[in-house]
Amino acid sequence: MTRRALALLLVPLLVVALGAAVSALLGLGLVLFGIATALVLIDSRSAPGPAAVHVERCADRLFSVGAANPVTLSVRAPHTATLLLRDDAPAAMLASAQYLSLHGAGERTYTLTPRARGESTFGHVHVRSTGPWGLGTRDFRAGEPLTVRVDADISAVRVYEALARRGQLEELGVRTLRRHGEGTEFERVREAVPDDPLRYINWRATARTGRLMATELSPERDQPVIACLDHGRLMGVGAGPLTKFDHAINAALLLLHVALRTGDRAGLVAFADGVTATVEPRTGRTQLRRLLDAIAPLQPGEIESDYAAALTEVRVRQRRRALIAIFTDIVDRDQAAALIGQCTLLRRRHLPLVITVRDPAVVDIARSRPRTAAQVYARAVAAGIDADRADALRLLRAGGVDVIDADARTLSPRLVNRYLELKRRAAL
């Protein structure tokens, strides 16, 4: 029933109320109420029903966690139809709009932002159709249920590709790797240019040609880059709208994509109290899809991570020197000491790099000015967590471990820049 119908029914009810004082008005009020009720019922029956209104939901079967994913409702209906739509979207997703209005046939689009990875199911689309007089309504369901898979957000990979094609990677804060002139592999001998370092001057070719010549090198390719993803208890802690594990996945995927694009091999080891997933380092366009499929079922658990079990397997399986990017979280000195021991063993053959996700909310609370007793307590707890974490990271660095500690916003560009810097220095 619409507001117009309520207003229409209110008039005879007022007449009936006046009939308590003037008996002649009572009968008139009842007659008017009956007429108004009949009009509402007739209008409700005239509203387009499920036979005349068809709704189709258009959405990708693969959603990205933490990103706004578009969903379009396509409607076929009489041009006179006035419709109100409510999609039965998964409760774990944040919708940009709960209700969508439409007159006649057309499309309406809204977005859903998933807060967790995994499978989610849509129900039906709930439709409220209003009659031609705007008095009565009909409620019914349309459309079909739909199951979607929520995966890691690879929008950063798409943005990287788009900016790389336009030569605008500096917009992401990424310093590009020159294809020529830096590295260890011989590319060619060419005429020198003013900015060539002295060490690249080829004196033998210069003497032979009579012109100043330089040796051009290129970065070595086909080197393994392995992301070790910790999905133990600490990685399930929130850092903004997503968990630290989700942020680690996003950064790891961008690193591995850049490695593949550079010509290196990309691989994966996931672990908690033991190794839970592995993808052998390979090149090729399909490797990123293999990595995504391996990551998809992984969720942070309630168990402590075992660095020894995971990194021992890395040492056993990976005989060739590789960049081992360990995505984890460190909260105390005991954890740091355990990781130092494993990184020391890794350094005999590999290049370990520890990546941790900082939660800016903890830092903000630790530095805030409390005004209530609860805020004083929260600040004390946050300050303790922040101090213990900073102490653990200092211990890692003092133990010779290369560490990147950044919030989710700056983590990916810092990680990619570190990888490209290692390539420039031929550290792999």
Image (cartoon, rainbow, N blue to C red):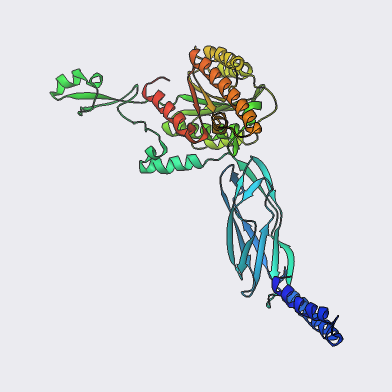
Instruction: Name the one closer to the observer, 170 or 255.
Output: 170
User: Relative to 159, is 11 above or below?
Assistant: below
Query: Which residue occupies 59% across, 55% down?
Result: 110
Question: In the rendering, at what x and y percent does residue 306 appear?
Answer: 64, 19
User: Relative to 133, is 207 above or below?
Assistant: above
Query: Which residue occupies 35% across, 41% down?
Result: 167
Query: Which residue occupies 50% across, 26% down?
Result: 405
Instruction: Name the one closer to the observer, 16 or 138.
Output: 16
Furthest toward the bottom, the residue is 24
Which of the 4 image quarters holds residue 141? bottom right
Is residue 349 visible in the rendered image? The answer is no
Query: Which residue occupies 60% across, 29% down?
Result: 379
Q: Quadrant of the N terminus?
A: bottom right
Furthest toward the left, the residue is 210
Which of the 4 image quarters holds residue 212? top left
Q: Left or right of 20: which side holds 257?
A: left
User: Relative to 236, is 50 above or below?
Assistant: below
Q: How many marks?
A: 0
Is residue 369 visible in the rendered image? The answer is yes
Q: Left or right of 257: which side holds 38?
A: right
Question: In the rendering, at what x and y percent does residue 301 appear?
Answer: 68, 29
Q: Quadrant of the C terminus?
A: top left
Question: In the rendering, at what x and y percent does residue 311 appear?
Answer: 58, 18
Instruction: Name the one closer to the observer, 316 or 341.
Output: 341
User: Relative to 50, is 344 above or below?
Assistant: above
Question: In the rendering, at what x and y percent does residue 103 appear?
Answer: 61, 70
